[in-house]
Image (spheres, rainbow, N blue to C red):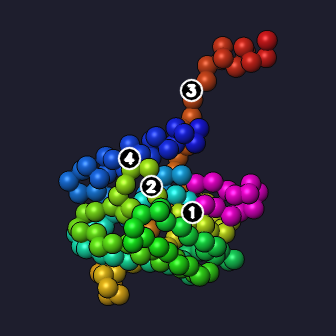
Amino acid sequence: MKMLLSVFAGLLLAATVASANPLPGIQVVNCIEEPPGTDIWVYDYFTCTGDFSANDLHIVLDPDEIAEGTEILGCSVPALPGYSCTFDATSATYYFPLKGPFSCVPGVSGQYLDIVIYTTDEFTRVLEQWTLDGAIIASFNTSITCPPVPTEDSAWGAVKSMYR
């Protein structure tokens, strides 16, 4: 299942990068509760700029929209030159080489940014701030949530055969 999601995510990233104007904002490709039953969620995602250049991305929890106790517990980046991240309980900052208009971060198929969030909600509202050398270039609200999970169609015959 994880392999299928990984293949789907790679295709989504490739299609986004190949399109003339990729969708701006966070695109979660995989999430997992780690360890199970703890409400600690690890989200793998990529994100794309709009019509601007940037070299930092700040993800800030929206205090008016989050469940009490929600906090950021970590972040990570792929092992690519110039990429790093820092975090505290209410924000994560990702640093990367300059990206031009309509570019994706990290922009390499199969490579993603990670954010670890403790939350009891189905989604987490955040403020996504793009900066260029410390100056805010763009800012908008978005949600971090698990992507839909593909399911298989079940036929009655398949269900009956499991119990024979």
Give the alpha-carbon distance from disc 4 to disc 2, as whole Å: 12 Å
Hey, which quadrant is residue 64 in on the image? Answer: bottom right
Picture disc at residue 123? 1
Q: Which dot marks residue 52? A: none
Which callout, 4 or 2, points to the residue nearer the camera?
2
SS under mark 3: loop
| Disc on the earlier residue, 4 or 3 | 4
How many C-alpha atoms fall within 10 Å of the one at disc 3: few (<14), some, or many (≥20)? Answer: few
Observer-side mark, 4 or 3, equals: 4
Q: Position of residue 55 (x, y in %)?
A: 33, 76
Q: Earlier in the sequence, mark 2 or mark 3?
A: 2
Q: Please tell me which residue is depicted at 62% across the width and 81% down the height of the picture.
A: 89
Which residue lies under the disc numbered 4? 12
**Which residue is label 2 attached to?**
111
- Say which residue label 3 marks: 153
Q: Are the residues flagged by discs 4 and 1 in contact, CB closer than 8 Å? A: no
Q: Secondary structure at mark 1?
A: strand
Residue at image coords 39%, 61%? 106
- As shown in the figure, which amino acid type bears the numbered disc 2? Gln
In terms of image quadrants, where is residue 129? bottom left
Q: Residue at x 41, y 45 (%)?
A: 10
The numbered mark, 3 or 1, whose residue comes first in the sequence reads 1
The disc labelled 4 sits on which kind of residue? Leu
Q: Which residues are magenta?
A: 31-42
